[in-house]
């Protein structure tokens, strides 16, 4: 329960007001009665023994920090059964988020000295011995400008302390879309280059009053960084190049330390004629020492291990080539100028950089995140969609296509196929088979469905079932074959001429394909192991399947004739229900983690290595999510989820998990979503 104004905390701190509140706690202004000074009190409501032990250790480390551009931690304590508290200097002034919202873009001459101070503070944190500290939440809302024009880096809610022992304590790990690099979304390690990226994104936002395109969307190849000078032509080319290099998707292509980044910023400022007279003692002190030296001998995990130079999307635009303009969607930007244009190609050439610093095991400080954030929405608001079944021209709906999702539900007894608009309206039943129907899959043109019947409910195996075709004009289901052989898991080929499916006609589930008239049935897998859940590649030349050939559920790929099978992924994970993006680049699939189904993603050309959690940040990180299906524009997913642990519903979510919208809420079980083309 939040503290109230007038309360006295710990017999010392008189609470005056609440500055901000989040799911983990709140931040208050208070008066220290002993010293008669104003302080900021951060509250964390997680009070388990593990969190309390971690809090105590981390608070002591943070309390030892002394830097002119960092607030001092002056006290810390735990109140049993209530919360953990960190007392810090109260920093007067406005943060950069507030300045951008009130005044727009900040000039280069005004901003660069602030960010050199920020770099100096981060260099100090990264250089701490024996435990280097990463901030991991650098953004405009976490940099305050004081009345005497100093930049103060605040909010250590996501800070991580590197431990030479290599031990890891669970704590807060989150990200801010637009400011966090892709490695912070996944399970890989973060290091000094994570703060380099976030600092570059923060400078970008301050100089343009626009948030840079989200790193995860860029890593997936769906967005490209808009050149900084395209948004603000007044920025000098040297400064733009420095910032854009800091925003490289691959960590090894960024500056390898805050010292390198600050040197580039300083050189750009001097080239533009600016005079920098401030003393940056930790940048100067560490100029000859790699900032990652303190991370040596730590256990490592490289999140984007790759020997192929073209694995992540990159576009090099030579100086003599006319700039390419890519038409993008217009996104709403809360509290900041009202929006920005779509992506375009970046004009930054890859720069050869030193070797990667080793990455660290992480112990995340579990202090609350109370500062409001700049949020990067990834889609437009939900429109009202015509509920008609015919392909009636509509305003462009969310997700593209006609704006409808088919799914199975047992709300009327035996499961049937239903159709709903992407705004949750227009629910209509498409089938009424006495023994049930499920697993709807759309034809490429959206004019027909293939589904499985009979169906008693959501399950992996449908022995005795067959495949049926439902024409959306007459809604009269017809069996694909007169003699079903335990056929299920249908997948329609992209040219619309064949259907792949799992069948038990040979005794064990195998992958087959057939023409639309039920002829020319071919066994594509012919393996001794169970194989099911085929999904065609967008080009129709390959299939992803689930195979039990190693004992557990694994993803494998094979050509459309059943040859050239290869493992997709690694380890003993339980991976099922693959979904292929329409551009063929991304695969999202379901993985059981500690018994809870989560969504994972990987570039197809990476063969599942590395992979990353799709929805790791709050508030959706705890929700089970299964059976993903891409929207026609690849920006959204239709999923089955049950946030309350009981009621299975259909929802849609952006692929970077910034928005999740529940479409159904019936107490019955809703499952098998399929987004209509």
Image: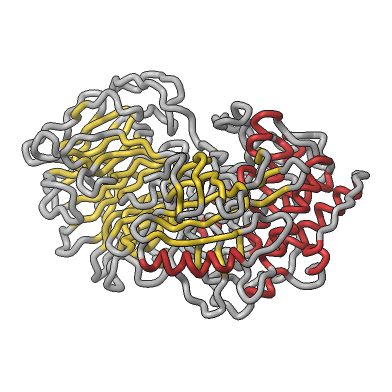
Q: Is residue 443 visible?
A: no
In the image, residue 643 sits, relative to residue 156, either above or below, namely above
Which of the pair 355/27 is nearer the observer? 27
Q: For the view shown, which residue lies furthest in the left direction?
A: 434
Residue occupying image coordinates x 37% and y 63%: 556
Residue occupying image coordinates x 50% and y 67%: 363
Residue occupying image coordinates x 68% and y 40%: 93
Q: Is residue 40 left or right of residue 382?
A: right
Q: Is residue 169 left or right of residue 190?
A: left
Which of the pair 45/454 is nearer the observer? 45
In the image, residue 411 sits, relative to residue 504, either above or below, namely above
Q: Is residue 488 left or right of residue 220?
A: left
Residue occupying image coordinates x 17% and y 62%: 506
Q: Quadrant of residue 372?
A: top right
Q: Is residue 293 visible?
A: yes
Residue 300 locus on image (x, y percent): 55, 74
Residue 125 locus on image (x, y percent): 67, 64
Q: Quadrant of residue 289?
A: bottom right
Residue 554 locus on image (x, y percent): 33, 65
Which of the pair 509/318 is nearer the observer? 318
Q: How are the residues colored?
A: secondary structure
Residue 572 locus on image (x, y percent): 35, 71
Count of all numbered marks drawn on residues in the image:
0
Which of the pair 602/534 is nearer the observer? 602
Q: Quadrant of the C terminus?
A: top left
């Amino acid at each position: 329960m939040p503290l109230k104004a007038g309360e006295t905390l710990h017999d010392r701190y008189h609470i005056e007001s609440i500055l901000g509140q989040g799911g983990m706690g709140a931040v208050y202004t208070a008066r220290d009665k002993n010293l008669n000074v104003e302080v900021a009190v951060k509250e964390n409501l997680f009070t388990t023994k593990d969190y309390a032990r971690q809090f105590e250790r981390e608070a002591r480390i943070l309390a030892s920090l002394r830097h002119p551009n960092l607030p001092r931690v002056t006290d810390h304590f735990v109140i049993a059964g209530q919360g953990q508290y960190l007392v810090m200097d109260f920093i007067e002034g406005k943060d950069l988020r507030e300045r951008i919202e009130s005044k727009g873009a900040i000039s280069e001459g005004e901003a660069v000295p602030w960010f050199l101070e920020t770099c100096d503070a981060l260099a100090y944190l990264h250089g701490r011995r024996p435990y280097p500290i990463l901030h991991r939440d650098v953004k405009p809302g976490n940099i305050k400008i004081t009345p005497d024009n100093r930049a103060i880096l605040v909010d250590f809610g996501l800070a991580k302390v590197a431990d030479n022992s290599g031990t890891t304590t669970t704590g807060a790990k989150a990200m801010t879309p637009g400011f966090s690099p892709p490695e912070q979304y996944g399970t890989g390690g973060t290091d000094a280059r994570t703060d380099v990226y976030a600092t570059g994104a923060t400078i970008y936002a301050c100089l343009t009053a626009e948030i840079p395109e989200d790193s995860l969307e860029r890593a997936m190849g769906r967005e490209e960084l808009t050149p900084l000078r395209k948004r603000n032509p007044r920025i000098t080319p040297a400064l733009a190049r420095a910032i854009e290099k800091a925003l490289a998707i691959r960590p090894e292509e960024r500056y390898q330390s805050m010292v390198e980044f600050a040197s580039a910023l300083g050189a750009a400022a001097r080239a533009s004629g600016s005079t920098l007279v401030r003393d940056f003692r930790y940048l100067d002190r560490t100029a000859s020492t790699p900032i990652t030296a303190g991370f040596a001998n730590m256990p490592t995990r490289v999140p984007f291990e790759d020997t192929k130079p073209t694995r992540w999307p990159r576009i090099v635009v030579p100086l003599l080539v006319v700039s390419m303009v890519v038409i993008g969607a217009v996104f709403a930007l809360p509290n900041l100028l009202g929006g920005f244009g779509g992506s375009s190609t970046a004009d930054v050439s890859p720069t050869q950089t030193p070797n990667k610093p080793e990455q660290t095991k992480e112990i995340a400080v579990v202090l609350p995140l109370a500062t409001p954030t700049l949020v990067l929405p990834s889609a437009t608001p939900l429109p009202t969609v015509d509920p008609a079944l015919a392909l009636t021209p509509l305003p462009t709906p969310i997700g593209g296509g006609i704006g409808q999702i088919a799914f199975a539900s047992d709300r009327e007894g035996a499961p049937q196929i239903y159709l709903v608009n992407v705004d949750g309206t227009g629910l209509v039943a498409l089938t009424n088979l006495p023994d049930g129907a499920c697993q709807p899959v759309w034809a490429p043109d959206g004019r027909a469905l293939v589904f499985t019947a009979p169906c008693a409910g959501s399950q992996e195996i449908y022995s005795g079932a067959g495949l049926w075709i439902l024409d959306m004009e007459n809604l009269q289901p017809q069996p694909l074959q007169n003699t079903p052989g335990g056929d299920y898991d249908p997948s329609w080929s992209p040219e619309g001429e064949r259907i792949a499916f799992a069948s038990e006609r040979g005794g064990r589930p195998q992958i087959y394909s057939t023409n639309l008239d039920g002829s020319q049935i071919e066994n594509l897998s012919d393996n001794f192991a169970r194989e099911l859940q085929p999904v065609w590649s967008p080009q129709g030349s390959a299939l992803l399947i689930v195979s039990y050939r190693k004992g557990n559920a694994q993803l494998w790929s094979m050509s459309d004739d059943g040859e050239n099978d290869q493992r997709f992924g690694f380890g003993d994970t339980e991976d099922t229900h693959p979904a292929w993006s329409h551009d063929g680049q991304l695969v999202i699939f379901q993985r059981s983690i500690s018994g809870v189904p989560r969504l994972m993603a990987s570039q197809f050309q990476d063969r599942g290595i590395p992979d990353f959690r799709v929805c790791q940040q709050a508030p959706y990180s705890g929700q089970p999510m299964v059976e993903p299906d891409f929207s026609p524009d690849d920006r959204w997913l239709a999923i089955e989820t049950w946030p309350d642990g009981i009621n299975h519903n259909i929802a849609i979510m952006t692929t970077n998990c910034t928005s999740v919208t529940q479409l159904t809420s019936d107490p019955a079980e809703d499952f098998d979503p399929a987004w209509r083309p």
